[in-house]
């Protein structure tokens, strides 16, 4: 418990320098926001690089190589290209919705990171509704997709947008049910509480062991929410050109592209927070500190644990991203009817069953299932 | 009730099997990641074309007797042979010869039928230009020999599968000068000669 608290430290320093506490807090406020936006952007860019490199490796190719060491600068080249590219709205498109669509998708994804913690106090805002907030905000994205599809004045875009809406609605329910089972076990919706409840015995207390069914449901639904293969129907190249993105170029396309990878990072973060113990290491770090005789409030120890925590959550997140990319090259795409079947006839009943099971286990074994 | 339970059981079995198959598929993709990329990084690396490679046609001006056989055997009568009949020597004098490689299909008929072996095929295949008219090679351009892949200091030559030493599967891993599997043509020739002599 405890851990590093940057806000308090900074506010103390600033009030010590003679500022009022309100002004000190106002100076603090934009810092974590900017930091998180930067981290998420870099995370999404790394995702695009990983996508290229891992896809290449899975097909015995090399992938990007000459743009920086191991082609690491290829996302920079991508962004630079998209930024300077001219945007060409199609004839008779709805100019307002055409621009608003990608913006809504992008903003809704980035807003979700408001409650995603990198450590005990390393998040923008620890609001009580935590995981519910993420689910609520992320369901705004399909409205943006629908807007983009409708405004493009293109039949493929419209079909893609409609499919995106249908898919998101179908898969949000199992996603919410899986998260609900976790919330029931943790007695809280707050992301911080959910992680703290997994902290006691390291690897053994992670929710994946207590919620294996929920984990599977959540991963499948999260992949579908990200519109990644095998659930990439809204942008199915083979049938719909590029779905709702068909008529997009330049910066507006970059918003979709960045948004989809940020969404993948978000899904990975959520999986690691809900099921893989968030920033907790596979062994309880606090007890290691006790054994070494270090007080939990020692500054350098706090910095080390915070660093290890950030590394842990990033590793878990990118493990999910890696699996998603590998899955992309292993699994054939589902048809739209199979997709809806999987959502409504498989994940939904299993999700309900999992919820009931969790409730029953919580009553029967309150010590293990958070009574 | 029992019927329902058996249905649920079958459904669960199906799901488990599907998960198993997905796992197997992931195993295959994962295994591919540790294999060496088969990419040949043209133009820094190039495959060595086989000795029968049908590349850009080479033409020797002095050997040509302007018989126009190449034009007749060409599917589209492509070679342009410009000559003048010299009545003094009663012989055709070649003035110019050209082949447009933008149109040529590299079938090799002209090479096959040329009575004086003035035509031959090289290993050159990268004929890209900024203007398609540059692909119309005149007799001077046709007379040039391409740089061999094995002799170009800027290029790492890589051998194709059939030309690798015994047991080797990857051109990247062997030196291109290493002896290939099986007997070489000259050895086969020597062997067959011994056979006829005996």
Image: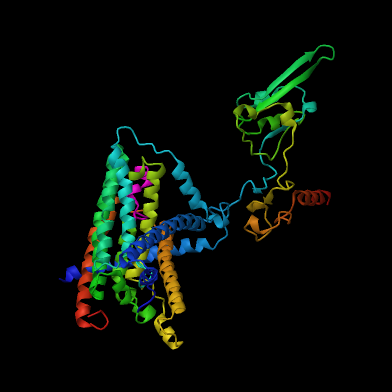
Q: Is residue B114 above or below residue A224?
A: above
Left or right: B153 as drawn, with respect to A325 = right
Colour scheme shown: rainbow
Q: Residue B92 appears at what percent x and percent y?
A: 78, 17
Quarter in which the C terminus of chain A is drawn:
bottom left
- Residue at the farthest left position: B1
Along the line of sight, the residue nearer the viewer: A81 or B49: A81
Can residue A178 be seen from the camera position used here? no
Above or below B55: residue A11: below
Q: Is A22 left, or right, of B196 in this rendering?
A: left
Residue B1 relative to residue A289: left or right: left
In the image, the segment drawn in magenta is A226-242
Q: Residue furthest top?
A: B87
Residue at x 76%, y 19% (from the top left corner): B95
- Residue A120 screen position, x and y as percent: 35, 73
Reply yes or no: does residue A252 show up in magenta.
no
Q: Is residue A227 magenta?
A: yes
> Compared to A294, does B71 lie above or below?
above
Nearer to me, A25 or A124: A25
Between A92 and A243, the residue placed more toward the observer is A92
Identified at 40% across, 81% down, the residue is A297
The quadrant holding residue A130 is: bottom left
The vertical placement of A364 against A32, above or below, is below
């Amino acid at each position: 418990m405890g851990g590093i608290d940057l806000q308090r430290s900074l506010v103390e320093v600033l009030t010590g320098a003679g500022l009022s506490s309100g002004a000190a807090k106002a100076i603090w406020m934009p810092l974590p926001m900017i930091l998180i936006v930067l981290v998420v952007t870099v995370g999404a860019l790394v995702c695009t690089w990983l996508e290229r490199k891992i896809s290449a490796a899975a097909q015995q190719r090399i992938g990007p190589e000459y743009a920086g060491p191991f082609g690491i600068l290829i996302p920079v080249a991508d962004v630079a290209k998209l930024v300077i590219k001219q945007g060409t709205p199609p004839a008779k498109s709805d100019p307002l919705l055409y621009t608003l669509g990608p913006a809504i998708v992008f903003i809704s994804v980035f807003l979700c990171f408001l409650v995603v913690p990198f450590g005990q106090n390393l998040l923008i805002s620890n609001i009580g509704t935590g995981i519910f907030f993420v689910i609520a905000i992320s369901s705004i994205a399909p409205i943006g997709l629908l807007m983009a599809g409708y405004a493009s004045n293109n039949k493929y875009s419209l079909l893609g947008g409609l499919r995106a809406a249908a898919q998101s609605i179908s898969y949000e329910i199992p996603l919410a049910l899986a998260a609900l089972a976790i919330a029931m076990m943790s007695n809280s919706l707050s992301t911080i509480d959910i992680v703290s409840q997994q902290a006691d015995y390291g690897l053994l207390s992670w929710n994946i062991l207590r919620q294996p069914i929920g984990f599977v449901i959540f991963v499948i639904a999260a992949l579908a929410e990200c519109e990644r293969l095998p659930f990439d129907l809204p942008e199915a190249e083979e049938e719909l050109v590029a779905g709702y993105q068909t008529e997009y170029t330049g910066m507006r396309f970059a918003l979709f592209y960045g948004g989809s990878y940020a969404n993948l990072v978000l899904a990975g973060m959520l999986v690691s927070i809900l099921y893989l113990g968030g920033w907790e290491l596979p062994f309880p770090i606090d007890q290691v500190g006790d054994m070494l005789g270090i007080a939990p409030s020692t500054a350098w120890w706090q910095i080390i644990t915070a660093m290890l925590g950030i590394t842990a959550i990033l590793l878990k997140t990118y493990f999910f991203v890696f699996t998603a990319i590998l899955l992309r090259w292993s699994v054939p795409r589902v048809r739209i009817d199979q997709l809806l079947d999987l959502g409504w006839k498989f994940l939904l009943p299993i999700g309900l069953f999992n919820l009931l099971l969790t409730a029953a286990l919580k009553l029967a074994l309150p010590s293990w299932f958070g009574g | 009730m029992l019927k329902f339970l058996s249905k649920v059981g079958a459904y669960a079995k199906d799901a488990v099997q599907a998960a198993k198959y997905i796992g197997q598929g992931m195993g295959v993709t994962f295994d591919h990641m540790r294999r060496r990329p088969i990419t040949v990084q043209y133009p820094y690396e190039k495959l060595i074309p086989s000795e029968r490679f049908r590349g850009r046609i080479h033409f020797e001006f002095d050997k040509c007797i302007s018989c126009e056989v190449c034009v007749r055997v060409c599917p589209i009568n492509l070679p342009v042979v410009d000559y003048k009949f010299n009545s003094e020597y009663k012989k055709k004098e070649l003035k110019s010869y050209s082949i447009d490689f933008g149109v040529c299909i590299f079938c090799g008929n002209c090479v096959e039928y040329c009575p004086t072996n003035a035509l031959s095929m090289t290993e050159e295949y990268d004929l890209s230009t900024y203007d398609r008219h540059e692909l119309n090679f005149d007799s001077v351009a046709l007379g040039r020999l391409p740089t061999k892949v094995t002799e170009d200091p800027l290029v790492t030559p890589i051998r194709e599968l059939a030309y690798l030493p015994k047991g080797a599967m990857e051109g990247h891993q062997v030196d291109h000068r290493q002896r290939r599997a099986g007997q070489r043509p000259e050895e086969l020739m020597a062997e067959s000669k011994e056979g006829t002599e005996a």
